[in-house]
Amino acid sequence: MPIPVRLRRGAAAAVILGATLALTGCGTESGSDGSVTLGFVNGDTSEFAMCLQKAVETTAKAAGVRVHLANSQQDPGKELSNIEDMISRDVDALIVQTVNVDALEGDIAKAGSANVPIFLTSVATDDVSGILGAAVVDLRRLGALDAGWIAKDAGGKQVKVGIVAGAPGAASDLMVAGFTDALPAHAKVVANQPGMFNPVVAQGVAENMIQAHPDLDYAFVANEEMAFAVRKAFDAAGAEDVRIVTENGTDKGLAAVKDGRFSATVANSPQVIGETAVTNAVARLDDTAKADRITRIPLTLITKENPDEAPQYCAR
């Protein structure tokens, strides 16, 4: 399917050269000359999502791009209604951090029928011909990096592993699949429950997990916010020796790796994703500019040995 492009030819180039704007507040829009208008539909209110939004806003502001904001709060139905609202605002393109990869087909069809192209963050559809582009995180590889650390640390011993996933149907599923597929045969997954990207839920999951499996050796947790809650639950149960691997690469997460609360984290920077999404979306809207349709975001396994290799997680 060809990509619908609504932007006036040459307008994006003019934007990149530096139109001015004034930020008018979260949840409304930014911009002043209106030459390019983007809609950003975020997936939830986690730290990752809020840092992603901040990167989108600040990058748009620097480029003179108007941005409308919406949040789907982990609800695929709300995501579709947010897209419909953005279409009614006459945006030139949509940047979408989906809550559910299964919802993307409907999202893209709805936007396509209105001749509004979609740029995806974190994930991409199998067929990318129908999207403007994507800033893609290889979530399977992310999970595999953590699994690789466990394989190396376990050294061939039989070990038990617990998983505190995110929200079912979201990017968490890809991370968990990559993690479990990459685990060695001697690492047995004894528990796998969703923490819903919510530290309170994750703590309850961890409390039940360690009670059912007091001999747990490792835990994979789908983000650092939940991982801190999981660490708290394990420590309270006297399971300080359970090694936690996770992902994000926040300042707090890096500090936890340094002091041993986490054994490893995979640096996955929403700042880099947001900057890439805005820059590439605007460039691809301009027929005269060149930008790859798909850009893969770098991932780095961070341990005590290399904390300085993590990119900045969130704009300060």
Image (cartoon, rainbow, N blue to C red):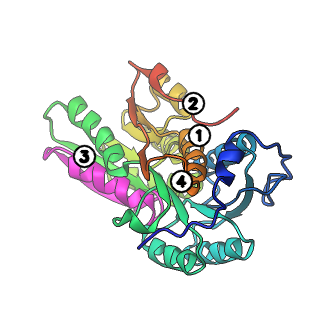
273 left or right, relative to 178: right
Q: Which label's residue is closer to the chain start, 3 or 2? A: 3
For residue 245, above or below residue 95: above
Q: Residue 153: give x, y in percent of width and height.
A: 24, 30
Q: Which label's residue is closer to the chain start, 1 or 3? A: 3
Residue shown at the point (45%, 63%) measured from the top left: 170
CB within 8 Å, label 4 to label 3: no
Separation of disc 3 and disc 2 at Cα?
Answer: 33 Å
- How packed mark 4 is, by other alpha carbons closer than 10 Å (few <14, some 14-19, many 20 or more), is many
Q: Circle 1 sits in a helix, a strand or a loop, which is it?
A: helix
Separation of disc 1 and disc 3 at Cα?
Answer: 34 Å
Separation of disc 1 and disc 2 at Cα?
Answer: 7 Å
Residue type for callout 2: Gln
Residue at image mark 2: 312
In front: label 4 or label 3: 4
CB within 8 Å, label 1 to label 3: no
Residue at image mark 3: 160
193 falls in the magenta region? yes
